[in-house]
Amino acid sequence: MTAMFEAMNDRSSNERSNNDKDRFTATELAALRSDLLQGGMIDSYEAAELLQVFLMGRGYGVSPKAALDAAGRVEMAGCALPVLQFELENLALVM
């Protein structure tokens, strides 16, 4: 999880897209993907928990059930960045 937390600290508003839908930087997504792949995504529950921690660390709420469903879809897609981004953006609930 080290890469994810380093990316959280290195975030820059310059990396953000002007599109409100793009809530996460490429650096953040790459770090999360690395953490998911490093853990082998063996356990969907652990992957879902990692997605929840990622989102909550950025001030978003997330449904545990929805996170588990999203983790399964990300896993089936081989943790492809576009799929990961799509799932995170749909999971993130504004608090």
Image (tube, rainbow, N blue to C red):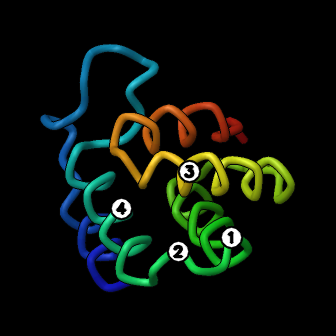
The Cα atoms of the two marked residues, 3 and 2, are separated by 10 Å
Quadrant in which the N terminus is drawn? bottom left
Tag 3: residue type?
A: Met
Tag 1: residue type?
A: Ser
| Residue ID for mark 1 | 44
For the point 82% across and 59% down, the residue is 64
In primary-sequence order, the first of circles 3 and 4 is: 4
Mark 2–mark 1 contact, CB under 8 Å? yes
Residue found at the very far top of the displayed protein: 19
The Cα atoms of the two marked residues, 3 and 4, are separated by 14 Å
Disc number at residue 33? 4
Disc number at residue 41? 2
Q: Which quadrant of the view contains residue 46?
A: bottom right
The front one of 61 and 29 is 29
In primary-sequence order, the first of circles 1 and 4 is: 4
Q: Answer with left or right where residue 48 lies relative to residue 50.
A: right
Q: Position of residue 49 (x, y in %)?
A: 67, 72
| Residue ID for mark 3 | 76
The Cα atoms of the two marked residues, 3 and 1, are separated by 11 Å
For the point 26% across and 57% down, the residue is 30
The Cα atoms of the two marked residues, 2 and 4, are separated by 10 Å
Q: Which quadrant of the view contains residue 45?
A: bottom right
Of circles 1 and 4, which is in front? 1
In primary-sequence order, the first of circles 3 and 2 is: 2
Q: Secondary structure at mark 1?
A: helix
Q: Answer with left or right where residue 61 lies relative to residue 39.
A: right
